[in-house]
């Protein structure tokens, strides 16, 4: 029997949604303790794409690639055409700087063809996914780039991953670029594997160098298409990542939970963090198409604990789905539990917590309106006690079928209060009736976890202009682009039309955090006060 939960942020025993929304609004009105900072529209920048159907902003990642102490923003442009090479793809780097912010210093655009060992081809979709870590520990962050459309030995969409290494100045050392595929690793490069569709970087073992985890959610396993797999490129060296040590995992691997089934898409979401608090990162893997019970596509998330040689399997594993005892909700067909993941310390207790996107969820609203479930760390890992479920109409009066709330997630301390906050993208939301214009919600962390009181909504109506097909929120990434204050949020808007009328040119929007009250607040200089209403805590 599953445990009952009765607090407002999760789910009461009654399913009276109008009552929930009304009570949530009352809570927001009465909980008004201000915090130090929050995201504001006044300090935002728009970096547009240029050409029709480039879809700039489908992927985003943040790192300090030139070692100047300021975060830079990498923007994937996977459908960039290189003359006659349709959808070859490219990546744009917006460099941060003191008092400037991402992109206000200089930007850089590059494609696979200019990298050592690279070969740009039509349909490669270079830049479909991105991940950042300092793989060679030289003080400059490096960028891993997914190329899931790459053809390997005639196998279309087998996939490839490239790594470019950071360097001083405003570029990368492209001569050191390295590439990986499943012919040089494990699993075999087969048509439709989509190796590189997802990426995560971080330290899993005891070695100081970060590891790179590559998802191939289209991998065939045991004769089942799209069962999914992951490759772990274990611990680099001063020369960067290599192929000497790697691990290939899927749901038929010894010690991994589950059984490979069609359309599981194991590895469709990845995250790395030390949730077990043993000074080794743990690997979180989403399989949003997983069959749970008799419910296809209900989804699951599992954790493989970090160990002495990358990932230890058959030891200290966990698996979560909505049929697990103690968790809110119930597994249902098409929920896609685990479609997105974001680790953060949402209650500020020093333990990592996990937000899980469930964009196909229908239990808490119309069909595929979506939801986000949050599991909290308990000092030894992620527990089920006190878990929360958030859905759209706890934050916004609008909720509709196929909004897919929770499609994307990002965590960081936007409020500069020592607790992480959660950005939730739902790029197919119809804002004020504008089809698929997209929305992003911000839930702020408190000592009791994430709360809807004081939540913010960001969409084209507030930030740009509200246009159909923008898909604002398709990708999210957090970083401190100016090096001061709370974290900023980068938002991908890949469907945006350019100012010149190029449909689907896309772009990236950067929102920054600012003090709710300026330094002159206590001196009564009202002109220096923020115009933003203080949020709840």
Image (cartoon, rainbow, N blue to C red):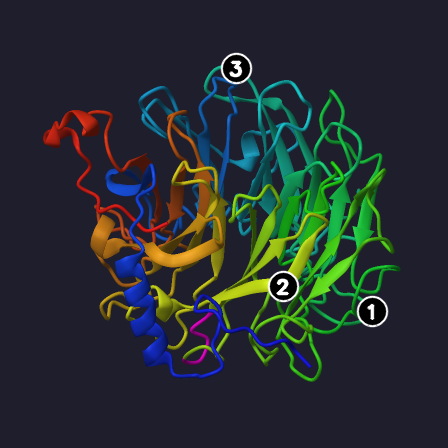
**Image mark for residue 168:** 3
SS label for mark 2 = strand
Where does the magenta region start and end? 366-370
Q: What element carries label 1?
A: loop
Q: What element carries label 3?
A: loop
In this view of the protein, can residue 186 be seen by the observer?
A: no
- Give the percent coordinates (x, y) of residue 376: 60, 55
Disc number lying in front (2 or 3)? 2
Residue beneath label 2, please?
385
Q: In this view, does 346 lie to the left or right of 322?
A: left
Is residue 168 one of those drawn in magenta? Answer: no
Mark earlier in primary sequence (2, 1)? 1
Distance from disc 1 to disc 3, alpha carbons, whole Å, reads 47 Å
Say if 146 sits above or below 384 in the image.
Answer: above
Give 299 or 436, whichever is nearer the viewer: 299
Q: Which of 421 and 191 is in front in this view?
A: 421
On screen, 71 above or below 412?
above
User: Which mark, by number, is residue 222?
Assistant: 1
Which numbered mark, 2 or 1, is in the foreground of this view?
A: 2
Q: Which residue is drawn at 22% across and 47% down?
A: 533
Label 2 environment density (alpha carbons within 10 Å; few <14, some 14–19, many ≥20) = some
Q: Could you say which disc has been placed on residue 321 in the image? A: none
Q: How far apart are marks 2 and 1 (CA)?
A: 36 Å
Whichever of labels 2 and 3 marks the residue nearer the N terminus, that label is: 3
For the N terminus, the quadrant is bottom right
Name the chief secondary structure element in magenta: loop
With 70 as the anchor, is 459 left or right in this view?
Answer: left
Q: How far apart are marks 2 and 3 (CA)?
A: 47 Å
């Amino acid at each position: 029997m599953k445990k009952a939960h009765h607090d407002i942020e999760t789910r009461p025993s009654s399913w009276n949604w109008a009552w929930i929304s009304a009570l949530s609004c009352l809570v927001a009105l009465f909980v008004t303790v201000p915090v130090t900072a929050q995201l504001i529209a006044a300090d935002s920048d728009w970096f547009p794409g240029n050409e029709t159907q480039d879809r700039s902003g489908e992927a985003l990642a943040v790192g300090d690639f030139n070692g100047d102490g300021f975060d830079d923003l990498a923007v994937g442009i996977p459908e960039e055409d290189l003359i006659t090479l349709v959808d070859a793809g490219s990546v744009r780097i917006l460099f941060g700087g003191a008092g400037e912010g991402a992109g206000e210093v200089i930007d850089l655009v590059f494609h696979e063809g200019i990298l050592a060992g690279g070969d740009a081809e039509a349909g490669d979709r270079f830049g479909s996914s991105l991940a950042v870590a300092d793989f060679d520990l030289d003080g400059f962050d490096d960028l891993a780039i997914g190329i899931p459309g790459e053809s390997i030995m005639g196998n279309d969409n087998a996939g490839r991953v490239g790594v470019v290494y950071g360097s001083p100045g405003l570029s990368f050392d492209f001569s050191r670029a390295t590439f990986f595929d499943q012919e040089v690793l494990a699993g075999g490069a087969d048509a439709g594997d989509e190796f590189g569709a997802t990426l995560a970087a971080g330290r899993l073992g005891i070695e100081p160098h970060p590891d790179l985890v590559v998802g191939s959610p289209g991998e065939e396993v045991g004769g089942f298409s799209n069962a999914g797999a992951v490759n772990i490129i274990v611990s680099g060296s001063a020369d960067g990542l290599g192929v000497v040590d790697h691990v290939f995992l899927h749901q038929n691997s010894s010690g991994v939970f589950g059984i490979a089934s069609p359309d599981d898409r194991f590895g469709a979401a990845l995250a790395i963090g030390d949730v077990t608090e043993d000074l080794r990162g743990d690997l979180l893997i989403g399989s949003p198409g997983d069959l749970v019970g008799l419910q296809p596509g209900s989804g699951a998330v599992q954790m493989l604990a970090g160990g002495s040689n990358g990932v230890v399997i058959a030891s200290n594993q966990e698996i979560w789905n909505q049929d697990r005892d103690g968790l809110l909700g119930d597994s249902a067909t098409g929920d896609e539990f685990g479609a997105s993941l974001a680790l953060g310390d949402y209650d500020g207790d020093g333990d990592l917590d996990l937000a899980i996107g469930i964009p196909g969820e229908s239990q808490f609203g119309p069909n595929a309106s979506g939801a986000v479930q949050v599991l909290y760390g308990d000092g030894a890992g992620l527990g089920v006690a006190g878990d929360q479920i958030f859905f759209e109409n706890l934050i916004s009066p609008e909720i509709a079928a196929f909004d897919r709330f929770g499609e994307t997630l990002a965590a960081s301390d936007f409020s500069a209060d020592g607790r992480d906050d959660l950005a939730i993208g739902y790029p197919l939301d119809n804002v004020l009736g504008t089809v698929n214009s997209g929305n992003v919600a911000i839930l702020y962390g408190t000592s009791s976890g994430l709360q809807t009181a004081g939540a913010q909504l960001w969409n084209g109506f507030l930030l740009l202009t509200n246009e159909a097909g923008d898909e604002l929120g398709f990708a999210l990434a957090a970083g401190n682009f100016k090096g001061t204050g709370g974290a900023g949020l980068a938002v991908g808007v890949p469907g945006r039309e350019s100012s010149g009328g190029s449909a689907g040119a896309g772009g990236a929007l950067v929102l920054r955090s600012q003090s709710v009250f300026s330094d002159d607040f206590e001196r009564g200089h009202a002109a220096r006060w923020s115009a933003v209403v203080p949020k709840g805590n």
